[in-house]
Amino acid sequence: MKQLWLTAKLDIVESLRARWFQVYSLVFGGIVALLFLFGLTESRVLGFIGLSRLLVTYIQLTMAILPIFVLITTVRSVAGDREAGVYEYLLSLPVSLAAWFWGKILGRYIVIFLPVFAAMVLAVLIALVRGIEVPWGMFGYYTALLAVMCACFLGLGMLISALARSTDMAQGAAFVVWLTLLLFLDLILLGVMIQGKVSPEVAVTVALANPLQVFRTAALALFDPQLIVLGPSAYVILDLFGATGYKVFAVIYPTVVGVAAATLGYQLFKRGDLP
Amino acid sequence: MIRFDNVAKSFRKSRVLDAINLEIGLAERVALIGSNGAGKTTLIRCLLGEYAFSGRVTINGRDPRLERTAVLGNIGFVPQLPPPLKMPVSQLIEFSAALCGTDPAKIHELAARLGLDLAPILSRPFVKLSGGMKQKLLIAIALGREAKLLIMDEPAANLDPEARKIFFELLAERQDDTTMLISSHRLNEVSALVNRVIEMDMGKVVLDDRVADDVSLSGQFACRIVIKRGEAAFAKAMQAWNFRDLGDGLKWEGVVPGPDRLRFMGMTSRYVALISDYSLEETGSGRSQ
């Protein structure tokens, strides 16, 4: 446990000094600041106004930025460190491979989750100061979604880092994974379905297996519980899970994907060449 | 202590280690030499449990891959190229000391002996230190623990003469109960440090020989050099070795650490046309405990 925490702390300190972290924090803090600045809390969408409107927009933007940010920065620093000889030295110290790998994940998780969560807290604080009502339920669920999103893409990033032998390969693979997930978002699947190339059941299953789409749908479900904007697919989702069931699924499924990817990454890491 | 049984390692189709069989006993000081690509670094990484390979490596009967914490706790490692760590010096010391069960004060003390005052640089990122400072710190971390095996890849390459002298003294203090594996491209860099030479080429051991061990690691030589005319470059070189100018830059006197004498003579050979008198006399142990 001591080794795990020491490794996590090491990764946190390394990340805090890295430029990517400064850009990352600035992007998410900046989004919230800009949304307030442009008076988003006063605009109205589907009856949503105030902080709910801002949080809906924030999570949509986060969903677009966070996955690729987490994937690229994770593979760059993990594969980059290995390539630069950092692993050769640090793994010559008496630290177990499990403590090293999972400690790195823990440290990185804290580093990538805290800025997006801090931005949410910042939004709530500004709302409280301005006397805007805070939708605590929505705040809680969106926080859970963000936490899960970080875990899911961090796990995928660590798997790619364990597989790729160079930074370039790892970055390329991360980009391909992100593009593939984008490709199987609802709009594209809808287009394929309309052309009659896949059956509706297959299209919906593929969409439900895609963590990006799961987050998108879960975020939509909060301000559109009947998922009207999704069209007929909504019937399949709501029949299968129910509104509450889908919210639970959207938190559990991506966590399982992230943990499974990280576990597979760990198995590959401990069996292969470390530096 | 260390045993390599039929160890082989390939990267794709390229065989980097080919059926290595070696036994290295306690307190042996081994020079691992060979040209680039000979397999030295791969052998060291197998020994540190960092590579997967065929065959078997054991240190005191234990597998460094399967029993990492127990085995690596007894190994001090100094890499050839310092890792580009962004963490502050203080954190590197804290991290390694906590993992190895070392008192950080010991690392500070060893660094000070090597001429590196850690207090002003504790908050600086490791990667921003000069080559010599990085090397001194990594040596202090490696020697700061109770390691029974020291693995060092060109450890003195970036050290100034004074730091090299202290470094040899530090090794001398541990030579009776510590096995040392020192890797280098050139034998003359490490020959005075070791009592066994293993040369590798194309992934195989091509030479395994004991060498004369007449001069101890802490031995010293009194040296006196007279030159025909003053020369700024020669004076600078002599000052770097802490030699005293006995008059007009023509007579120089100083002490050369025993293990460094070949390197010193190599340096002075560049000025052979200038030198009119040269003496090098063993003065015994300068070991400081």
Image (cartoon, rainbow, N blue to C red):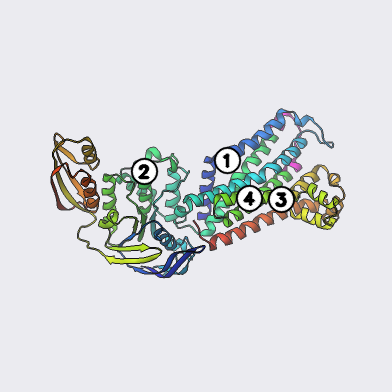
**B18 magenta-colored:** no
Question: Where residue B237 appears, x then y in whole percent?
Answer: 24, 40
As displayed, is residue A124 above or below residue B289?
above
Q: Which mark is residue A21?
A: 1
Please give the residue where the numbered disc 3 appears in the rendered image: A181
Instruction: Using the image, name the chain to which the residue with label 2 belongs.
Output: B
Q: Which mark is residue A174?
A: 4
> Amino acid type of disc 1?
Phe
Please give the residue where the numbered disc 2 appears in the rendered image: B133
> Amino acid type of disc 2?
Met
Total number of numbered labels?
A: 4
Q: Foreground residue, B18 or B26?
A: B18
Label 2, secondary structure: give it: helix
Label 4 neighbour load within 10 Å: few <14, some 14-19, many 20+:
many
- Earlier residue among tags 1 and 3: 1
Instruction: Using the image, name the chain to which the residue with label 1 belongs.
Output: A
Magenta residues? A126-139
Q: Foreground residue, B10 or B47?
A: B10
Look at discs 1 and 3 and give the one toward the viewer: 3
As displayed, is residue B132 above or below residue B8?
above
**A136 magenta-colored:** yes
Q: Indicate left or right for A83 with B41 as reference.
A: right
Residue occupying image coordinates x 63% and y 50%: A174
Q: Which mark is residue B84?
A: none
Question: Where residue B256 appears, x then y in whole percent?
Answer: 20, 48
Question: Where residue A33 appears, x then y in whole percent?
Answer: 67, 31
